Amino acid sequence: DHLEAAGHVCILKNALDFESPSEISNFIKAESLEAAMALHLYRGGRLLPGHGIPFGIIFGGTDLNEDVKQGEKNKVMGKVLEEARFAVAFTESMKETAQRQWPHAKDKIYVQSQGIATVPNTTFHWDTFLQRSEINQSADNLHVFLLICGLRQVKDPLYLVDAFSEWHQEEPSVYMVIVGPEVDPVFTREVKAKVKRTPGVRLIREMAREDLHAVVKNCFAVVNSSVSEGMSAAILEAMDLEVPVLARNIPGNAAVVKHEVTGLLFSDPQEFVLLAKRLGGDPALEKQIVANGREYVRMYHSWQVERNTYGHLVRMLEGSSED
């Protein structure tokens, strides 16, 4: 949207759609592409060098937190950065990580937080969501914790399941619902099997963005239990929608969630349950976190600032490689 607003014509493609460099080359020629931008230094970035068009990359999170530990991937990503005109990190800590790994690229790495825009209204109803989740209780007494993530191991959706289920058996009004696409088929089967035999935990498929945001507005809190994150859009969107956030205490989450100020950070499943109970019994804390979270997003995650930044970066792709 930012780029099209500046007058560019954009084509979105999934990196997994291309099986070889020749397919990328043919695509570039067929569409008469003049520049490219890749999200994720390894998955998207590795496809772009050598094709004669300028490109930039946006770090995803997994590339800097996980792929960097694998020698061959690390080497490939370093070569991508040699040719890239720019790279975008969501936080200063991500930038520092990249600079340590690839010092030759330090002058082309920019920091731009994810921007959050107002979400259109939707007619999606909370009762419909509860029916899909097979939660057969009065909405008035429910406390639904929403975990939004693609079903892959780095998101660790099963991290809280056992502890949450124990809590549910003490307090039947609390539920955790995992919502997201089935990214890893093998891992998805494991998640489905575990959830099926775990009281108080539900799993439903991904939803349209505007419908999901309507659900977020009605849930008690949004949860993040990832092993690593770049910058969680679900956390930022929850803050923007004035919903409390409970996030696993990892660098990517701690960069946007300040404990007891803009959200709550937990280090293990037992601490999550304690903090969730505390949040439920302390309306003043909930009110404070919600207000601070909304203000934080408005101050540091402006979509207008994001638009200006990417407009500037794309202009770098329009000139010669010496610009």
Image (spheres, rainbow, N blue to C red):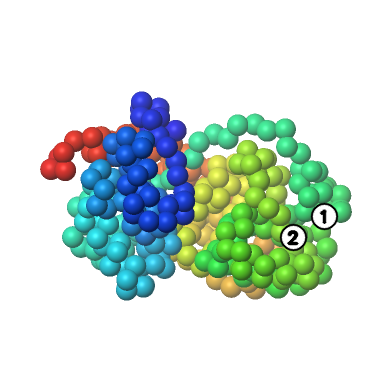
The quarter of the image holding the C terminus is top left
Q: Residue at image x 80%, y 43%?
A: 127
Callout 2: few (<14), some (14-19), or many (20+) C-alpha neighbours within 10 Å?
many
Marks 1/2 in contact by CB < 8 Å: the verdict is yes
Q: Residue at x 28, y 36 (%)?
A: 34
Tell me the distance, in whole angstroms, between the alpha carbons under discs 1 and 2: 8 Å
Residue 170 drawn at (x, y percent): 81, 69
Residue 134 can be seen, yes or no: yes
Q: Quadrant of residue 166?
A: bottom right
- Mark 1 or mark 2: whose residue is earlier in sequence: 1
Q: Where does the N terminus fall, quadrant-wise?
A: top left
Q: Is residue 78 left or right of residue 11?
A: left
Q: Position of residue 109 (x, y in %)?
A: 26, 52
Q: Secondary structure at mark 2?
A: strand
Q: Which residue is mark 1?
A: 135
Near-viewer residue (136 or 20) = 20
Residue 272 in sight from this viewpoint:
no
Where does label 2 land, which residue? 202
Q: Please tell me whether residue 190 is drawn above or below residue 5 in the rendered image.
A: below
User: Within the image, what quadrant is residue 304 found in?
Assistant: top left
Left or right placement of residue 198 versus residue 90 in this view:
right
Q: Is residue 53 above or below residue 188?
A: above
Which of 45/296 is in front? 45
User: Going 42% across and 56% down the picture, which residue do you hit?
Assistant: 19
Between 68 and 24, the residue placed more toward the observer is: 24
Residue 199 spot, x, y in % from top left? 80, 67
The amino acid marked with disc number 1 is Ile
Residue at 32% across, 47% down? 25
